[in-house]
Amino acid sequence: MTRFESYDATALRAAILAGELSAEQATRAALEAAESRGTALGAFLHVEGDAALARARALDARSRTDGEPGALFGVPVALKANMCLAGSPASCGSRILEGWRAPYDATFVERLLDAGAVPIGATNMDEFAMGSSCENSAFGVTRNPWDVSRTPGGSSGGSAAAVAAGIVPIALGSDTGGSVRQPAALCGTLGFKPTYGRVSRYGLIAYGSSLDQVSPFARSGRDLERVMGVISGADGRDSTCIEAPPLAIEPAPQDLTGLRVGVPAEYFPTDLDAGVRSAVEAGIDELRTLGAEVHEVRLPHTRYAIPTYYVVATAEASSNLARYDGVRYATRATGDGSLQGMIAATREAGFGDEVKLRILLGTYVLSSGYYDAWYGKASRVRTLIARDFETAFGEVDVIACPTSPSPAFALGEKTDDPVAMYLSDVMTVPASLAGLPAASVPCGALERDGRELPVGLQLIGAARDDAGVLGCARALQEARGPVAIAPMEGAAR
Amino acid sequence: MSATTWVPVIGLEVHCQLGTQTKLFCGCANRFGAEPNTLTCPVCTGQPGALPVLNQHAFDLALRAALALGCDIAPWSKFDRKNYFYCDLPKGYQISQYDRPYCSGGGITLASGKHVRLTRIHMEEDAGKAVHDAGNTTRVDLNRAGVPLIESVTEADMTSSEEAHAYLVALKEILQYAGVSDCDMEKGSLRCDVNISVHPEDEPWRTKVEIKNLNSFRNVSLAIEHEIGRQIAAYEAGAAIAQETRLFDPDRGETRTMRSKENEADYRYFPEPDLPPIPVDAALLERERGLLPEPAAERRARYRTELGLSEYDAGVLTSERGVADFFEAAVRASHDGTAKDLTNLITNELLAGLAGDEIEASTIAELPCKPHQLAELVALTQDGTITKKAARSVVREMMKTGRSPAELVRELGLEQVQDTGQIEAWCRSALEAKPQVIDAVRGGNDKAIGACMGAVMQASGGSANPEAVRDTLLRLIRESD
């Protein structure tokens, strides 16, 4: 590992601009790490070495008079495999999109490229972002770089592992019910889900449209702010995008003096993992040390969040995934030769079990005669959950709680028990349903089987207060010191 | 036993493509007849990750249609997804409106005085087109996918094929006049489904059947006639009518089962999460109301009362909004009292020319000659510069070239001869050739003068002013006493 690999994106960009290394060298280092550590972890589905090096060389060839260098100048980044980069594969971890290459750039990808970022490849994920462990990918599991016998979390596990292992300083994932915050917690990185609509979804392959948000991973609070500054902002190609200018790329550090931090009892159940509890409490103490006041808040509808989420998200998914019919792109099976037969055979062969399960669930809850009892009711409960937060944010500025009820679990531990798997999102789903900004910040570690496993503290903010959550996350991270690069415990050397 | 009187109950669902430049949710051109799959993009081909964005102009046109049909505009509406699988439906769902359409109510009063109520109109996107080749191949053209549609649904207020036909003609006229659509059934921009049942007079309504695939007004009438007969025959034979969807087969002139109710798809409608609800503010409504043109029926009445045209002429002029607009522009550029002359030139020359092969243009607006030129031409007949007959030859040239009438008159030598000396000379020779005319006129038969008039007009090559010729002939006959 070169010394630059422990740099965050902000420092790496500065080093490139100072001439300490070239964009090409930075990209080459990331590509080599993706080949070695990335392969050991199963972090990448696809690495675009030649295209990445060509982009990096083009950056190096820029003359100093070409204007202000981009906010991510020369920074190698990884994209989750559900993101469109023109000409690159975006399989979503599914057989059904195997070989499909995006015909266009996502808005947030365009903005990354304009800022001088260098995408090096597509990271592994649970198929169509459906899962919490990266075990639902059709192309193999991703491993946790703190203990390779464990899951990195999901669904954005590949991006989380790539950042945690120091392959890239930043990566994008997508968070629908916790798919960035939970793996960030399990891999010991920072992760941030913006307010719904803060980042354009144009070019993010949909799972649950009313919940999906492009969300970054980073190893520093300032990097999270920097990436958000680049990818956020209104977009004429996404009607659900908030009409607002981009967030600041380099905001002033936030002073937490007098910040009112709410701690909801509902997020500290009696069966919460003791190691998680003490690490999160230590994190909250840290906030207090920084000047914050801690208050108790109530979020009484929290327990309905998981069932509500699995109605809303699966309903939307059942419709969003209807386009994979074998007619226009990617894989096609023949079936009995009829149109309906071809569509059925294509979907039977192309989708994995978890995807089929969720399509069935979603189809059921939207069916004539069941809509009101399921989708209609879930939509109303969703409003109640959002109101809980509104009430709480009348009293506090930010809510602090665990990101995940447990640390990284063993590969295979929950694959036969979908409900247990779904419950690993119990702490992240409420903010998703309410569309709120939420970050996960490393707040300590616990020991399991002789290995150190990271714990994440979740910070949830009021709608549109992305800057507040980011500022708080950064203050906590900087108070705790640099985020360590994962040691790759258990990996063959 | 007295024969049962059967009462048909008919409702119509009409899809109409809006005449926008671009599609409903993307920037692709909305145009008929392009090479297959050339008017497409990631959005309308349903590429992963692409998102719809509402074309505001399409919504404005839909609003205008609703205002023209007297509908109540909802203060806000939303889009929903209608889920089903078919090869011409790229996303596996159609973006439509389900329980919050953008308008409701309204209706059309037919010429017969019958009022047909509208239940609602909603917006949706069109699907692509599947072309089933001979053999086992289906080709899909997505040029049409995402074209904006309004679907208007009537109450079951009609009781005969004639009423249904009259409704469709009136609907088409209103939508065309509002500038909402070209309503060209041949291009598929107007499509119609029929809901129909029959019941004995004084009894409740019976099971309804839906008929699809009606691609002309004539086929709508034929299908209704056939279906009424089929249902009555079934009931009279003691059979039942199943609730189902039937297809009209234009070759056989009959309907046949497409799918039964049990096989109807469950569309699993739910709110489109990619599109926020659409509010309608008062300013937008006012603007659209201001853009509504005068309806055809009102124009027809005005042409008769204010311009003194016959019902027939008024009907021809308002058959298309473009023709009526052209006519009115020409009237505005003319002196009073020229409406009939303008009408004759438009209906006998311009419309006939458009229908023929010689003129390239297919609508009156595309002609190179403009309304003010037609007004100039009529003015030349009014001041005696040319004859009405000559005006007809001039307008035929104008249609091809768009050149000014005065210029064409000069060039074609059509100016009437006003030179009294020359006219008198022609008249003298004519009378000398036919002295019997003099006696006849003196005997009180003024019509006999026609024989000499013809000779003079022939001698002048049609350029003599007929009134001047007549006056001269009469004077010479009087003087020859």
Image (spheres, rainbow, N blue to C red):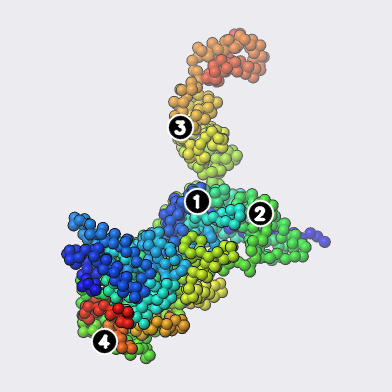
Return the residue nearer the eye: B88 or B170: B88
Earlier in the chain: of badge 3 and badge 2, it is 2
- Name the front one of labels 3 and 4: 4
**Chain name for mark 1:** B
State if disc 2 and disc 3 touch (CB < 8 Å).
no
Tell whether label 3 touches label 1 (CB within 8 Å). Answer: no
Q: CA distance from mark 1 to mark 3?
A: 36 Å
As drawn, which residue projects farthest toward the right? B1
3D distance between C-alphas at marks 4 and 2: 77 Å
Report the front residue among B57 and B345.
B57
Judging by the rendered image, the residue that carries numbered circle 3 is B402
Image depth: mark 2 or mark 1 in front: 1
Real-space CA distance between mark 3 and mark 2, rounded to the nearest whole angstrom: 46 Å
Q: Residue at x 31, y 88 (%)?
A: A450
**Secondary structure under the numbered disc 4 in the rendered image:** helix
Q: Is residue A181 visible?
A: no
Q: Is residue B262 left or right of residue A310?
A: right
What residue is disc 1 on?
A: B36
User: How many C-alpha atoms fall within 10 Å of the one at disc 4: few (<14), some, or many (≥20)?
Assistant: some
Q: Amino acid at mark 3?
A: Gly
Residue A146's disc is none
Q: Pointer 4: what residue? A: A282
